Image (cartoon, coloured by chain):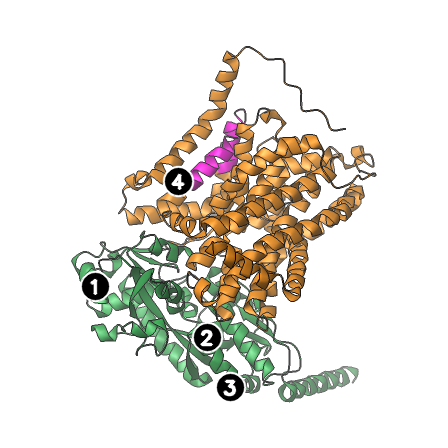
């Protein structure tokens, strides 16, 4: 008798708590994770998004951002597994979420987080020193076709990650054989730009944001951007796309917000809605403009489909260059 | 004089009451964070980052710079008083700073460190104004092979710091290099020695190694003697925080000649404060007339690295301001902040936002003064930590160390590694194996390996790339000389008629 009363009581408490959860959400502070150090793309995206969400009153609870760097985002991915079902854990990711899995660095994948919404797209760029013999992306491709080792390509991410993939994707689309032999030399952070400015590498494969400053100053030339259409404003507006140069490919650095695995439906819908409203605010427009981001909102289910499709594309490319590895 | 006019304009931007107030705030915050083991300038700047969104860009950047310098000033406080470096750049300050404190000269040690930091910073700020652009261009000539040979030189000089311990120095160095192989290999993406633990994928953070080997190792070492030493080890009377004329005479030349070393290393985007401070220390030891006093509380052995690491932090601003290339972890965060504030770092910053560019440069001068003003009285309070009995102090040190390493990755894995390196430090001290080569190897090991492999990829495998430029050849020659020097100088001394043992620099008591 006593036991059954206890059981009933426990059930009642659970029920009340559960109900309170859904309707009061959010009622306590979030934990917003940037899976890398401060100052980078993930960190900036998360900080900007939480800033607008709270300032516009779309989310009433505090949204402090914490940095969990390591393993190309893998450490944070392992961390959110412990938060399964917790609707107060948010994390930002981009292509490396798929890539660290496909290159075998972690067995966790995009399936181990809950996609809430894609927010922005960013694109890559290929830059050369100002006195480089290469005048266009076609010149680089021609050189690679003759001898894949002849052009030393620098980048700021590890092999098999974004900077590497975007040059391979371009070379692949242009019909370069011997993708495996292309000399990709990874540097850390800003050192890649220094290596280009000093003429130590022939081509720098990197994000658009990284090249704007030195391009404006005339220290480098940018041969191509990986966006589908030309960038509308700023110094990059004069730079042709890969497509314009007959290389039919686009490389997107998408960024979106995810929840912990098994994020409850109602809370996910709430956040999706809040983010959907956020991207329509003037302050978000301003932030995107300032950072050179292209607005690219995509809701939860579309985002999930997109991830699945993109994962297959990356897999094909990585298999081709022999970097695809199933984590043990 | 265009530059002077711009600089004056910069002062008019930086010296507004609000900017000065933020500068003072930044200096205090930086000093405090710098003192705490594990928390360094990059943590400070990152912590402050969210507050900058609502600020004017020049104020934000001035405050961040103040945090940076503050941390450089503060980093050596715990090196001197507790033998725990606040971060890598303060490791070399332990070598003679802590022995000074042990000899009852803590006041002088704290004072000379602030004075040397001040002078190093001020001279570098002048050099910044005069030489920023040509220096930045020069730094670009450093490609992977140049970095590799630079690190070979730094390590060789550190391992060969004493002839007797050359072999032990090499052992220490190799252990350090081995530690840096843990983690995901940047070139191939392969995991090395991670045992499948995601926490080890990004490698072992050098801050954990430093705090373990120095802080925890020191506590373990003292644990042996805690009963024997008991109460007499603590200092009860404290003097004024200042130095004697004698100490100044020994220090001013080392400060002046190691400042350029620190400044130059700061400008190189791939080097950093640890290398700068270690090199300054090595140089002074090799140039000194009484190298045997180094490591036992030689005042110039503290002054030189202190001047160099502050000079380095100012040098590190140059690639960021003039090229848009961050020269250190901290300036990388600042660069991110600039972008968030809507400014494009790089040469055009001076044209598009002269208020920010010159305001920040002027603040280099002002923040140095502010930091010095804050640090001298602060030292008067801090020095009293020496009056805390060991049985209370050491548990506190352990708590601080644990807190410090936890903030690196917010993972408990760091605790295990910390204790492990505490034991390593204990055994190294017991067997008199020098720890400096290990620490420097841990700091530079990863980038040294990467530079080596980047070089070989650039040359399609030909080793000749390491002698491709005059910079490489000079650095390799310097490395050879620094290993040979202890032997050579010994031979020279033996040939000279034995002088009456030089007066062991008047004991200060």
Cα–Cα span, label 1 and label 2: 32 Å
For the C terminus of chain B, the quadrant is top right
Secondary structure, mark 3, is: loop
Q: Chain of mark 3?
A: A
Cα–Cα span, label 4 and label 2: 40 Å
Pair 4/2: label in front: 2
Q: Which residue is mark 3?
A: A281
Q: Position of residue B307 (x, y in %)?
A: 58, 42
Q: Position of residue B171 (x, y in %)?
A: 50, 33
In this view, which residue lies farthest toward the top? Answer: B497
Q: Which residue is mark 2?
A: A290
Nearer to me, A159 or B261 = B261
Q: Which residue is mark 4?
A: B149
Q: Is there any visible trace of residue B81 in the rendered image?
A: yes
Callouts 1 and 2 close, C-beta under 8 Å = no
User: In the image, what residue occupies the spot 76% across and 44% down?
Assistant: B383
Chain shown in green: A
Q: Residues within 10 Å of mark 4 (few under 14, many from 20)?
A: many
In-image side of A59 versus B443 (left or right): right
Question: Which hue is chain B drawn in?
Answer: orange
Whether callout 1 and callout 2 share a subunit is answered: yes
């Amino acid at each position: 008798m006593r036991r059954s009363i206890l059981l009933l009581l426990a059930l009642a408490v659970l029920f009340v708590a559960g109900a309170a959860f859904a309707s009061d959400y959010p009622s306590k502070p979030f934990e917003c994770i940037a899976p890398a150090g401060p100052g980078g793309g993930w960190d900036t995206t998360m900080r900007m998004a939480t800033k607008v969400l709270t300032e516009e009153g779309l989310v009433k609870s505090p949204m402090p951002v914490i940095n969990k760097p390591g393993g190309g985002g893998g450490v944070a991915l392992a961390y959110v597994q412990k938060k399964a079902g917790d609707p107060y854990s948010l994390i930002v990711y981009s292509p490396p979420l798929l890539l660290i899995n496909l290159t075998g660095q972690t067995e966790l994948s995009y399936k181990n987080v809950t996609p809430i919404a894609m927010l922005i797209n960013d694109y890559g760029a290929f830059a050369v020193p100002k006195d480089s013999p290469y005048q266009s992306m076609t010149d680089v491709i021609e050189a690679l076709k003759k001898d894949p080792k002849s052009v030393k390509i620098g980048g700021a991410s590890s092999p098999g990650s974004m900077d590497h993939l975007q040059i391979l994707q371009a070379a692949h689309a242009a019909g370069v054989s011997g993708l495996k032999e292309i000399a990709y030399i990874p540097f850390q952070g800003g050192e890649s730009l220094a290596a280009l400015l000093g003429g130590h590498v022939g081509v720098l494969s990197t994000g658009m944001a990284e090249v704007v400053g030195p391009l404006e100053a005339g220290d480098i030339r940018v041969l191509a951007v990986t966006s589908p259409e030309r960038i509308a404003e700023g110094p990059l507006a004069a730079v042709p796309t890969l497509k314009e140069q007959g290389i039919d490919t686009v490389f997107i650095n998408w960024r979106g917000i995810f929840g912990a695995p098994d994020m409850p439906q109602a809370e996910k819908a709430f956040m999706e809605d809040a983010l959907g409203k956020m991207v329509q605010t003037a302050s978000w427009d301003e932030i995107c403009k300032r950072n050179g981001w292209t607005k690219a909102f995509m809701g939860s289910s579309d985002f999930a489909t997109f991830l699945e499709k993109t994962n297959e594309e990356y897999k094909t490319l990585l298999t081709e260059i022999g970097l695809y590895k199933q984590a043990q | 004089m265009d530059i002077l006019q711009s600089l004056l304009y910069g002062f008019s931007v930086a010296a507004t009451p609000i900017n000065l107030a933020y500068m003072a705030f930044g200096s205090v915050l930086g000093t405090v964070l710098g003192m705490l083991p594990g928390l360094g300038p990059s943590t400070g700047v990152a912590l402050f980052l969210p507050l900058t969104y609502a600020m004017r860009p020049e104020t934000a950047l001035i405050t961040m710079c103040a945090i940076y310098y503050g941390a450089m000033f503060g980093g050596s406080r715990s090196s001197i008083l507790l033998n725990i470096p606040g971060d890598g750049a303060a490791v070399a300050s332990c070598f003679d700073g802590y022995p000074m404190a042990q000899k009852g000269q803590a006041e002088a040690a704290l004072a000379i460190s602030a004075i040397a930091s001040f002078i190093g910073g001020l001279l570098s700020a002048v050099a910044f104004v005069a030489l920023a652009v040509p220096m930045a261009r020069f730094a670009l000539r450093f490609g992977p092979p140049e970095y590799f040979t630079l690190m070979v030189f730094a390590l060789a000089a550190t391992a060969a710091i004493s002839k007797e311990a050359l072999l032990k120095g090499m052992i220490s160095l190799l252990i350090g290099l081995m530690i840096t192989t843990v983690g995901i290999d940047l070139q191939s993406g392969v995991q090395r020695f991670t045992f499948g633990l995601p926490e080890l994928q990004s490698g072992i953070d050098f801050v954990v190694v430093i705090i373990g080997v120095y802080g925890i190792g020191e506590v373990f070492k003292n644990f042996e003697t805690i009963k024997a030493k008991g109460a007499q080890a603590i200092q009860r009377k404290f003097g004024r925080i200042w130095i004697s004329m004698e100490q100044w005479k020994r220090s001013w030349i080392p400060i002046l000649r190691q400042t350029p070393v620190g400044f130059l290393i700061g400008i190189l985007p791939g080097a950093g404060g640890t290398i700068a401070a270690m090199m300054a220390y090595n140089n002074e030891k090799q140039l000194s007339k009484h190298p045997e006093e180094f490591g036992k509380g030689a005042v110039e052995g503290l002054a030189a690295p202190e001047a160099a690491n502050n000079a380095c932090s100012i040098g590190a601003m140059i690639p960021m301001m003039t090229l848009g290339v961050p020269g250190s972890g901290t300036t990388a965060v600042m660069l991110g902040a600039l972008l968030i504030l809507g400014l494009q770092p790089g040469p055009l910053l001076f044209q598009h936002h002269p208020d920010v560019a010159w305001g920040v440069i002027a603040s280099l001068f002002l923040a140095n003064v502010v930091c010095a003003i804050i640090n001298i009285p602060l030292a008067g309070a801090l020095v009293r930590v020496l009056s805390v009995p060991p049985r209370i102090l050491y548990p506190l040190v352990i708590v601080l160390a644990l807190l410090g390493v936890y903030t690196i990755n917010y993972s408990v894995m760091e605790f295990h590694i910390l204790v492990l390196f505490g034991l390593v430090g204990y055994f190294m001290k017991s067997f008199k194996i020098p720890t400096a080569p290990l620490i420097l190897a841990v700091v530079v090991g990863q980038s040294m390996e990467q530079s080596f492999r980047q070089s070989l990829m650039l040359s399609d495998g030909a080793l000749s790339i390491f002698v491709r430029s005059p910079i490489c050849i000079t650095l390799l020659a310097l490395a050879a000389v620094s290993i040979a020097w202890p032997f050579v100088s010994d031979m020279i001394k033996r040939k000279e008629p034995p002088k009456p043992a030089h007066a062991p620099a008047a004991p200060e008591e």
